Image (cartoon, rainbow, N blue to C red):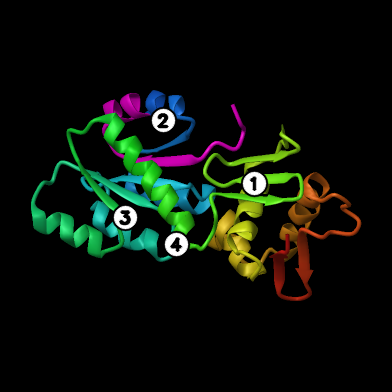
């Protein structure tokens, strides 16, 4: 199993939901992350930048719709609402507030996994990225979070992969230091440019044909980095 499995954050205060979803997500190739409250969930979004969020509305500390609004202030990934509230107005309000989908409890795990796959594909398409990007013998599969060279997997840490994915999804445009730091490490690290330089250097060692003369990840001095494959 790749170390770079898509991370799915499940924010729900029902232990049985986590016991039900964790093995199903793992079997489908995802890395589940658990949060039991809205506060904890928002911290996990900022800290781990999950690929998608499954959000319950009935949380113990504050309402899930408020959590949705707060998350959308800094997170642009898919958010699928999971709720026992079945009123049409509730669904409309939630979708208008930024949710990508709404799944009613009780639900089938197969349906939820299908909706996750659709949401992840839509995220890539909306960013203008192809699901699979190649540069010579290097392949980046943005859906499977898999990076290979000549068919052999390249082992990246989760943060290295997230950094590479942000650049690849940029599609040749400059991605600023602040954009990269916020997307990969969260808003608290938006000014840690030296930290970013260290990770870019590590990433180049693994993906560049010649790390001393990078041709895939190029530097825009004082601004950011660009995927130039």
User: What is the secondary structure assignment of the residue under circle 1?
Assistant: strand
Distance from label 2 to label 4 (Cα)?
24 Å
- Residue beneath label 3, please? 100
The earlier-in-sequence mark between 3 and 4 is 3
Q: Position of residue 135 (x, y in %)?
A: 72, 52
User: Residue 101's x, y, as percent?
Assistant: 28, 51
Task: From the image, state whether disc 3 or disc 4 is nearer to you.
Answer: 4
Give the mark nearer the N terminus: 2 vs 4: 2
Q: CA distance from mark 2 to mark 1?
A: 22 Å
Asked whether disc 4 touches disc 1, contact meaning CB atoms under 8 Å apart, the reply is no
Mark seen at residue 122: none
Q: Which mark is residue 140?
A: 1
Would you name the residue on which mark 4 appears?
126
Q: Nearer the viewer, residue 156 or 48?
A: 156
Residue 206 lies in the magenta stretch: no
User: Which residue is drawn at the image coordinates 54% and 62% (left, top)?
Assistant: 187
Crowding near pointer 4: few (<14 within 10 Å), some, many (20+)?
few
The answer to which image quadrant residue 151 occupies is top right
Q: Earlier in the sequence, mark 1 or mark 3?
A: 3
Residue 78 percent location from the top left of the image: 39, 52
Query: Secondary structure beneath disc 3?
Result: loop
Q: Which residues are magenta?
A: 1-21
Q: CA distance from mark 3 to mark 4?
A: 12 Å
């Amino acid at each position: 199993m790749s170390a770079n499995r898509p991370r799915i954050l499940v924010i729900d205060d029902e232990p049985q939901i986590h016991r039900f979803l964790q093995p199903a997500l793992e079997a489908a190739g995802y890395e589940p992350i658990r949060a039991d409250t809205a506060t904890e969930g928002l911290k996990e979004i900022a800290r781990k930048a999950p690929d998608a969020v499954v959000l319950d509305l009935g949380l113990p500390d504050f309402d899930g719709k408020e959590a949705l609004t707060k998350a959308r202030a800094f997170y642009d990934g898919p958010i699928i609402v999971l709720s026992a509230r079945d009123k049409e107005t509730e669904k409309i309000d939630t979708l208008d507030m930024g949710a990508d989908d709404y799944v009613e409890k009780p639900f089938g795990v197969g349906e939820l996994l299908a909706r996750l796959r659709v949401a992840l594909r839509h995220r890539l398409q909306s960013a203008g990225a192809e699901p699979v990007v190649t540069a010579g013998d290097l392949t980046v599969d943005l859906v499977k979070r898999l990076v290979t060279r000549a068919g052999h997997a390249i082992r990246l840490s989760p943060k290295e992969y997230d950094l590479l994915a942000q650049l690849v999804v940029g599609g040749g445009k400059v991605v600023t230091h602040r954009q990269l730091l916020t997307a990969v490490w969260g808003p608290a690290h938006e000014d840690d440019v030296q930290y970013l330089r260290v990770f870019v250097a590590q990433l180049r060692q693994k993906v560049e044909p010649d790390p001393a003369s990078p041709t895939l990840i190029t530097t825009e001095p004082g601004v950011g980095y660009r995927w130039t494959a």
